[in-house]
Amino acid sequence: MSLNLEEKEDEYRNIFNMFSRNSDGNIHTQELGIVLRGIGLTPTQEQLDTYEIRINQKSEDGLLDFDEFIEIMKFQLEFEDFGDVAPCLDIFSRNADGLISVAEMKNVLTSNGEALTEIEFDEILEEAKIQPDGFISVEKFMNEFVEKSKGVFN
């Protein structure tokens, strides 16, 4: 679900405000899943629990305002867009073992569509601490992305 937040912000604000108790511009963390699903997103319970922990670390009353909600929305949209891509990564696994050759991935990502430069690809490998002559585990790659989600409010 790829959406432009600016184009839909009024719609999101209206849905958010429907759940705002006393029209105070805040919702409780317990309502976050309902609001996100009302917008058409599909957060997992683990993601909702993580969001709730982060919100409660900042706010003792468990409330979040619209700006905090939009930050969650940005991440959730990115996560769901990425989740749509993950099954495509398995295509690169020639042996169907969940591993992708770095060389093969480099060839595809530097020569198709909006191609990365070789330098950009090498920087990604370095940042992810992946050896250029190795393999990328699709599962590990997805787990690292999920782990990144835990730092949404940091």
Image (cartoon, helix red, strand yellow):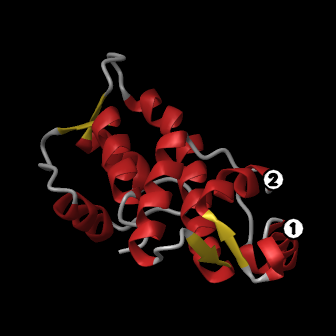
* In contact (CB < 8 Å): disc 2 and disc 1: yes
Q: Name which residue type carries label 2.
A: Gly
Q: Residue at x 47, y 50 (%)?
A: 49
**Image location of residue 104, percent across then percent down:** 31, 40
In the rendering, which numbered label is found on residue 108? none
Residue 1 in view? no
Disc nearest the viewer among 2 and 1: 1
Using a 10 Å C-alpha cutoff, classify the residue at mark 2 as few (fewer than 14 neighbours), some (14 to 19) or many (20 or more).
few
Q: Residue at x 27, y 62 (%)?
A: 124
Compare residues 117 and 37 and report the one nearer the observer: 37
Relative to 100, 132 lies left or right: left
Q: Residue at x 23, y 68 (%)?
A: 123
- Which numbered disc, 2 or 1, marks the residue that appears first in the sequence? 1
Q: Quadrant of residue 76?
A: bottom right
Q: CA distance from mark 2 to mark 1?
A: 11 Å
Q: Name which residue type carries label 1.
A: Met
Establish if 102 lies above or below 127.
above
Residue bearing the label numbered 1: 18
In the rendering, which numbered label is found on residue 38? 2
**Image location of residue 99, percent across then percent down:** 28, 29
